[in-house]
């Protein structure tokens, strides 16, 4: 009797502390300024590309008018360098008045009128990575401030901070966000900083307090960068897959599709891999100038459906370097709702397209005896029914992917 009462009290207090916003049941989708626009604050020299309300409004217009919103991209996220250089007389943060004349509240209203959501950036330490005011000592005030403005998502970075305190500091912020009563999707950089500092990461605690979280280094505009991120998730998959699920996702960072470096093959590969990883789909690109071939990849309904599968299970690498696949080709799978699967073949070859030839059993699909109906997702074509002995033949281009969907 007493024991169960104590348990109830404990559970109750746990419940009050954990993140309870009901958000991110599937990986969040939207746009985030950082990778493409960085800390460009010179609106005199570069009015079209500087971090200003105009940039976010223009991206919002493109999201709505060019089909992204209908495809599911709904968050428009500000990153670093939006603030005035210091807090106001009441210690409140405010946006740089020249670059954000409507203020963040005005910008949030703009997004909400269009059926979009606004995300913002804070830093847990004394300064943001770009040198703007940090939230240390002001966590509660800043949580209230962004809630009052109508912000819908918060990325909290961890520059200029004592990483050892993050295990208590980030959960503190979770409490303050809960207390505002406004559902604010919480994106935490905390585990990435612990990884960097060599501090053991408690992913159970992270998932109790954050909707999404960065695990690894920043993405840059290069295929090498995308590859190194994919490698990290493969290496850590036994730790990372179990902590992902509706409400909680690992974040391998932004989509750089439509920027300067990725070929069309590589862009398809990033999109498919992010769908397999159940990763947030936060584009960082210039939607005003993106070319149709890249836009089509970002808007591919069937790839997005895999990303947004409501079972919310993260996929993993299942085969690599023979004997079942040619050298340089690997296979990944992600379990989907209703016993379906997505599978991806990826080639690291820098030479010619390579042929693979595997059974459903080789891929580890559990119902291989009964067989699966297989679709090539990018080709938009049924490949047929594959029973126990049938081999799936696919040709994978250098740094390209073939993404399939298998239905029992
Ligand atoms: C860190 C983050 C990036 C970005 C910059 C901004 O490097 O990991 O995603 O927010 O700070 O300064």
Image: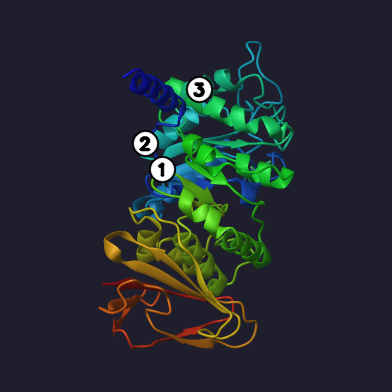
Q: Position of residue 198 (x, y in %)?
A: 72, 45
Q: Which residue is mark 2?
A: 22
Residue 279 versus residue 1: which sits nearer the camera? 1
Tell me if label 2 and label 1 are in contact, CB under 8 Å.
yes
Element marked by disc 1: loop
Q: Earlier in the sequence, mark 2 or mark 1?
A: 2
* Drawn side of residue 255 relative to residue 133, left or right: left
Q: Earlier in the sequence, mark 3 or mark 1?
A: 3
Q: Quadrant of residue 297?
A: bottom left
Residue 279 versus residue 66: which sits nearer the camera? 279
Q: Quadrant of residue 235?
A: bottom right
| Residue at x 71%, y 30% (from the top left corner) | 132
Q: Position of residue 128 (x, y in %)?
A: 69, 33
Can residue 288 be seen from the camera position used here?
no
| Residue at x 28%, y 79% (from the top left corner) | 371
The disc placed on residue 176 is 3
| Residue at x 65%, y 15% (from the top left corner) | 88
Disc 3/disc 1 C-alpha distance (Å):
18 Å
Residue 220 versus residue 197: which sits nearer the camera? 197
The disc placed on residue 247 is 1
Disc 2/disc 1 C-alpha distance (Å):
7 Å
Q: Residue furthest top?
A: 90
In the image, residue 279 above or below residue 169 = below
Q: Quadrant of the N terminus?
A: top left
The residue carrying pointer 3 sits among few (fewer than 14), some (14 to 19) or many (20 or more) residues within 10 Å by Cα, namely some
């Amino acid at each position: 009797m007493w024991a169960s009462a104590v348990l109830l009290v404990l559970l109750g207090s746990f419940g009050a502390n954990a993140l309870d916003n009901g958000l991110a049941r599937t990986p969040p989708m939207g746009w985030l300024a950082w990778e493409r626009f960085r800390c460009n604050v010179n609106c005199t020299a570069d009015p079209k590309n500087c971090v200003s309300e105009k940039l976010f409004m223009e991206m919002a217009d493109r999201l709505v008018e060019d089909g992204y919103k209908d495809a599911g991209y709904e968050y428009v996220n500000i990153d670093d360098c939006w603030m005035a250089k210091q807090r106001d007389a009441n210690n409140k943060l405010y946006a740089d008045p020249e670059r954000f004349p409507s203020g963040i509240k005005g910008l949030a209203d703009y997004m909400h009128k269009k059926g979009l959501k606004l995300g913002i950036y804070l830093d847990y330490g004394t300064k943001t990575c770009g040198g703007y005011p940090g939230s240390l000592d002001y966590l509660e005030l800043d949580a209230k401030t962004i809630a009052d403005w109508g912000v819908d998502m918060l990325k909290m970075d961890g520059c200029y901070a004592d990483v050892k305190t993050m295990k208590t500091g980030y959960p503190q912020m979770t409490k303050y966000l809960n207390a505002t009563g406004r559902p604010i999707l919480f994106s935490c950089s905390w585990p990435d900083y612990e990884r960097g500092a060599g501090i053991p990461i408690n992913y159970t605690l992270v998932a109790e307090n954050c909707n999404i979280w960065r695990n690894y280094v920043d993405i840059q505009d290069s295929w090498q960068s995308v590859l190194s991120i994919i490698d990290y998730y493969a290496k850590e998959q036994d730790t990372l897959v179990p902590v992902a699920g509706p409400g909680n996702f690992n974040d391998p960072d932004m989509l750089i599709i439509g920027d300067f470096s990725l070929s069309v093959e590589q862009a398809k590969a990033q999109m498919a891999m992010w769908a397999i990883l159940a990763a947030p789909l936060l584009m960082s690109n210039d939607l005003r100038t993106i070319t149709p071939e890249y836009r089509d990849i970002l808007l591919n309904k069937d790839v997005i459906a895999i990303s947004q599968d409501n079972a919310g299970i993260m996929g993993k690498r299942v085969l690599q370097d023979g004997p079942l696949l040619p050298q340089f080709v690997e296979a990944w799978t992600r379990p989907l709702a209703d016993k379906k699967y997505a599978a991806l073949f990826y080639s690291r070859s820098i030479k010619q397209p390579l042929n693979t030839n595997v059974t459903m059993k080789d891929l580890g699909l559990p119902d291989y005896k009964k067989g699966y109906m297989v679709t090539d997702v990018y080709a938009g074509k049924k490949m047929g029914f594959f029973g126990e002995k049938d081999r799936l033949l696919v040709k994978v281009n250098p740094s390209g992917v073939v993404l399939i969907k298998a239905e029992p």
